Image: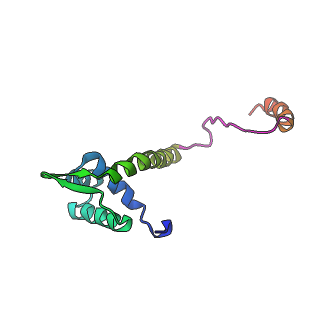
Amino acid sequence: MKLSDFDLNLMRVFLTVYRFQSITVAAEVLDLTQPGVSGALKRLQNQLGQQLFVRDGRGIAPTHLAHEMARQIEPALEAIENTLNDAQEFSVEGKRRFVVYATEPVMLNLVPKIEADKS
């Protein structure tokens, strides 16, 4: 499976279902219909070729694959959400701290210029 053929929007649906272990609650949180969430999960499972959730009484339980996927995907999705939130709040007038890595000769040339800049 190529990444270009993969629907990354399904990851958000997957993680929400994983967190709540409920398609109904995930649908409410995502503001989608229950059949829409079920369909998204089925598409994801078809793309992966493996099952992510199994019936557990009246609910669902994640498989080992689902646990592993969630562990790896959740930090990446949070980073994307944080980046988008930061982009909305970005201002050119705001103070920023930059970390620049350079060789010592370059730093010897840059430091006096940086220190002399009053802006």
Quadrant containing the C terminus is top right
Task: Give x and y (percent) for residue 114.
Answer: 79, 33
Query: As drawn, is 41 to the left or to the right of 86?
Result: left
Q: Residue at x 49, y 65 (%)?
A: 3
Per the rendered image, the range of residues in magenta is 90-104
Task: Give x and y (percent) for residue 80.
Answer: 48, 49
Q: Nearer the viewer, residue 3 or 100?
A: 3
As displayed, is residue 102 above or below residue 4? above
Query: As drawn, is 62 to the left or to the right of 78?
Result: left
Q: Is residue 103 located in the magenta-colored stretch of the structure?
A: yes
Q: Main secondary structure of the magenta part?
A: loop
Query: As drawn, is 81 to the left or to the right of 13?
Result: right
- State the scheme by which the image is colored: rainbow
Q: Residue at x 39, y 52 (%)?
A: 69
Q: Residue at x 32, y 64 (%)?
A: 45
Task: Give x and y (percent) for residue 112.
Answer: 84, 31
Task: Give x and y (percent) for residue 115.
Answer: 80, 29
